Amino acid sequence: MLGGLGNLANMLKVAKDLQGNLEKVQAQLAQKRFDGEAGGGLVRAVVNGKLALMDIKIDPQAAQDVELLEDLIKAAVGSAILKAQEGMKAEMSALTGGLPLPPGLTDLLGRGGG
C-alpha cells in the first residue's frame, strides 16, 4: 500500500516539475520572434511564440495591386506562424526529452496556456 502512495507522490512531483518547466518554456516562447515573408520580401510579418502578430512591413511596390497585397500579407503571416509552431514543437520536444507530445499541447502553448 505504501509503495502505491510513494509512486503517487513521485508522479505528482514530476507533474509539478513539468508544469513549472512548461511555464518557463511559455515565457521564453512569448519573447521569441519568428519572421515570415512573401513576394520575395515585399511583405514581411513577425509573430511571437504565442502566435500574436507583432509587426508587419510592406514594401511600397506591393501596394500597387491591392488583391496581390492581400495575398502577400496572408502568405507572410502564415509563414511566420508556421515557423513559430515549428519552434514551439522543438522547444516542447527538448522539454519532454523527445517523447511524443499529447494531441493539442502545442495548440495550448500557442494560446498562452488557455
Image (spheres, rainbow, N blue to C red):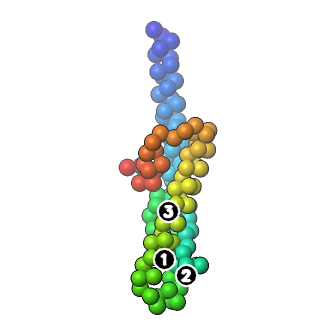
Q: Is residue 11 above or below residue 37?
A: above
The residue under label 1 is 72
Q: Label 2 vs label 1: CA separation? A: 8 Å
Circles 2 and 1, Cβ within 8 Å, touching? The answer is yes
Residue type highlighted by circle 1: Leu
**Dot 1: within a 10 Å radius of its alpha carbon, few (fewer than 14), some, or many (20 or more) residues?**
many
Q: Quadrant of the N terminus?
A: top left
Q: Is residue 84 visible?
A: yes
Q: Residue at 56% across / 64% down in the picture?
A: 34
Q: CA distance from mark 3 to mark 1?
A: 14 Å
Tell me which numbered mark, 3 or 2, is placed earlier along the sequence.
2
Residue 50: x %, y % from top left: 46, 58
Residue 74 image offset from top left, x and y in percent: 45, 72
Of circles 3 and 1, the one toward us is: 1
Q: What is the secondary structure assignment of the residue under circle 1?
A: helix
Q: Residue at x 46, y 91 (%)?
A: 64
> Where is mark 2, residue-wise?
42
